[in-house]
Amino acid sequence: MRYKIEVQDDTGIWSDVRGDDGHILVFDDENAARAALAERFPVLVQMEKYAGGKRTRVIRILEDEDDWPDKRPAAE
């Protein structure tokens, strides 16, 4: 499984969190994604624990054979 992180703006729009290179941050481990989310948005993550409301989230990326490279072993 792969995961990405998202944050909600003040108007309620969710957007992907991107790295310095402009690419969407993708993680192979959910715990790593949650740690990166807490590192980048510590105030929002802590507010969710005490004030309620959800402004950050970790999303599982579902693989689709049309979107991902062929994962079959190479022919010998």
Image (cartoon, helix red, strand yellow):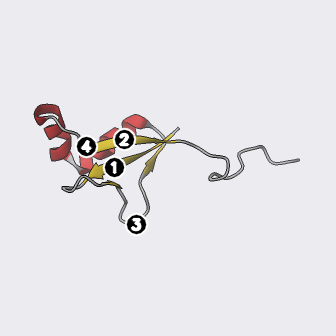
Direction from residue 65 to residue 35 in the image, left or right: left
Sequence-first tag of 1 and 3: 1
Query: How many neighbours does mark 2 have within 10 angstroms: few (below 14), some (14-19), or many (20 or more)?
Result: some
Q: Farthest residue toward the front?
A: 11
Tell me residue 42's x, y (percent): 19, 45
Label 2 residue SS: strand
Label 4 residue SS: helix
Q: Are marks 1 and 2 in contact (CB under 8 Å)?
A: yes
Three-letter amino acid code of the residue under disc 1: Glu
Q: Are marks 3 and 2 in contact (CB under 8 Å)?
A: no
Residue underneath mark 2: 58
Residue underneath mark 1: 6
Residue underneath mark 3: 22
Three-letter amino acid code of the residue under disc 2: Val
Q: Are marks 1 and 3 in contact (CB under 8 Å)?
A: no
Sequence-first tag of 2 and 4: 4
Q: Farthest residue toward the bottom?
A: 21
Tell me residue 41's x, y (percent): 22, 49
Label 3 residue SS: loop
Gap between marks 1 and 2 measured at Cα: 6 Å
Residue at the image point whose x is 35% and y is 65% from the top: 20
Task: Name which quarter of the figure residue 53 lies in.
Answer: top left
Q: Nearer the viewer, mark 1 or mark 4?
A: 1
